Amino acid sequence: MQNIVDDSVLVKNYINGNELAIELLIKRHQQRLYSFIYSKIQDRDTTEDIFQDTFIKVIRTLKKGNYNEEGKFLPWVMRIAHNLIIDYFRRNNRIPTFNNSDEFDIFSVLSDGTLNAENKIIKEQILSDVKGLVEELPEEQKEVLKMRIYNDMSFNEISENTGVSINTALGRMRYALINLRKIIEKNKIILVN
């Protein structure tokens, strides 16, 4: 039985000059990464481009020696791809406008289901506007909100990480959103682009 070399070992080997290691890493993760990008973009050519750009960025970062992800290679690569997808939507002015009307409430997209590409982009846009405001929240609400939104953790994972029940985590999230809304209104921030 052949031992599968760990990602972190391949990364080290590549940094130490073994060019073959990066090919193995790309081959190992290409299917997942490609599917991830395609699910957001829905266009094969653009997906190809972003896929290529992701690995160009990965290679540059590794060559510069700026990689320190403690063996979490795939999530790191996914994050790079994710940022490139956002850039793509921004460049093409395809960020959908968002109006916080009663029919569609941005915070309702926080359900545990996977967000569709459009909601994800809307969420990104709003997150960049709201990031500074989040800092004004009480510590425990801020912690849950960040885990949920920035780290994409489930309430189950949040509960395990914070040592509180799922209900408490949900409650903190609710209060965080209520408070965030108040802060947004107080600051007269309009979540529309």
Image: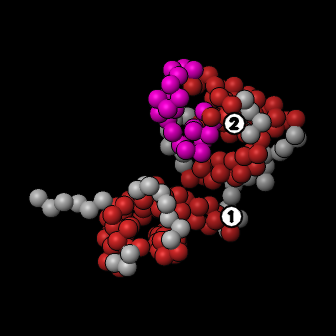
Q: Secondary structure at mark 1?
A: helix
Residue that label 2 marks: 105
Pointer 2: residues within 10 angstroms few (<14), some, or many (20+)? Answer: few
Q: Is residue 52 magenta?
A: no
As displayed, is residue 138 above or below residue 135?
above
Q: Which residues are magenta?
A: 144-168
Of residues 91 and 60, the one drawn nearer to the viewer in this rendering: 60
Q: In the figure, is residue 8 to the left or right of 165?
A: left
Magenta part mainly helix, strand or loop? Answer: helix
Residue at horizontal 15 percent and vertical 61 percent from the top = 2
As displayed, is residue 8 above or below residue 156?
below
As displayed, is residue 129 above or below residue 163?
below
Residue at horizontal 83 percent and vertical 45 percent from the top = 190
Amino acid type assigned to the residue bearing label 1 in the image: Arg
Counting from the top left corner in percent of width and height, residue 78 is at 48, 58
Look at the image and tell me in which quarter the C terminus lies.
bottom right
Counting from the top left corner in percent of width and height, residue 158 is at 52, 32
Q: Are marks 2 and 1 in contact (CB under 8 Å)?
A: no
Amino acid type assigned to the residue bearing label 2 in the image: Asp
In the image, farthest residue toward the front: 16
Residue 126 shows in the view: no
Of residues 14 and 112, the one drawn nearer to the viewer in this rendering: 14
Q: Secondary structure at mark 2?
A: loop
As displayed, is residue 158 above or below residue 125?
above
Of residues 119 and 79, the one drawn nearer to the viewer in this rendering: 79
Closer to viewer: mark 2 or mark 1? 1
Residue that label 1 marks: 90
Q: In the figure, is residue 128 to the left or right of 28?
A: right
Look at the image and tell me in which quarter the N terminus lies.
bottom left
Q: CA distance from mark 2 to mark 1?
A: 22 Å
Counting from the top left corner in percent of width and height, residue 152 is at 53, 43
